[in-house]
Image: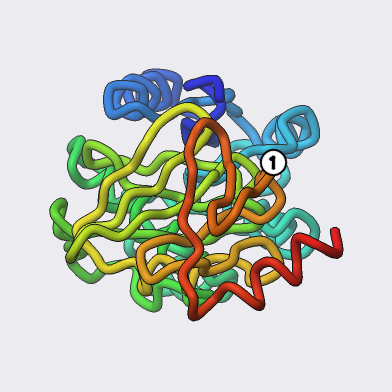
Amino acid sequence: MNSQNTKVKILIVEDETLIAKDIKNRLEAINYHVVGIAASAERALQLIKEHTDVDILLIDIILKGELDGIELARIINNHHHIPFIFLTSHADTHLVERAKSVRPYAYILKPFNDRQVSIAIELALMNYANKTHEKSLLKKQSFSKTDNQVLQIKDSLFLKKNHHFERVPLKDILFLQADSNYCTVSTKSERFIYSMVLKKIEKHLPITQFLRVHRSYVVNINLVNGFEGNMLFIGNKKIPVSKTYRNKVFKLFHTI
């Protein structure tokens, strides 16, 4: 799996060139991938069509042109269903109420620092995954950098690594392995280690694709390439199947 493909892809919509470049530099420094910068709502919509895999947008509320950031957000809600964060230095009541009406997933108040950008992205992805929205544009936001987070968004898991999220397509996950209170997610190219029990991560996985085969293992049934005795072959790993799950597991693989 190409490391570029695992990076969360972000589109910046900001008509102040220096601010947009500053945001881009901050995001890239914490290992996010900026697919482009749009100075207008119209350009943003064009870039969304060109980059259909955009994960999140940072939108300045005040934009030059016929559509401001709030109207752009309304179009995104209706037609593109991508989470977005509002950027704003304005706090007048009318603007706040208009912004709340399009249900942003997070916000960043200008001026901001690196940590505030990181917090906003994490909160927006969490809110989007949990189908919730940020209710207040003005409250102080907090997020513990030590929090373990596993989010399922569309066809991927968003996994925390070195204090940023990486996107891991479900189709690339080989298996999950429990070790006491830790869980390892093994993909085709790397491993993610979490200080949480397997069951908590398992609940984010589609049951049509992932199957518990042992108290310590959950496997991607689409990537099993063989079995022998009570062992499944997946990648270059042999996964044991316990007695509890044996009938269910081998009945499945005998019929595929």
The amino acid at mark 1 is: Asn
Is 51 drawn above or below residue 98 in the view shown?
Answer: above
Asked which quadrant contains residue 140, the reply is bottom left
- Comparing 171 with 129, the one in front is 171
x then y, percent, for residue 55: 57, 44
* Residue 205 seen in the current view: yes
- Comparing 29 with 242, the one in front is 242
x then y, percent, for residue 163: 23, 41
Q: Residue at x 74, y 37 (%)?
A: 52
* Residue 14 seen in the current view: no
Is 85 drawn above or below residue 38 in the view shown?
Answer: below
x then y, percent, for residue 16: 44, 26
Assign the N terminus to one quadrant of the image.
top right
Is 36 drawn above or below residue 74 in the view shown?
Answer: above
Q: Residues within 10 Å of mark 1 (few under 14, many from 20)?
A: few
Q: Which residue is mark 1?
A: 225
Assign the C terminus to one quadrant of the image.
bottom right
x then y, percent, for residue 117: 28, 43
Q: Is residue 2 left or right of residue 145?
A: right
Q: Residue at x 36, y 37 (%)?
A: 191
Q: Residue at x 68, y 35 (%)?
A: 44
- Comparing 42 with 229, the one in front is 229
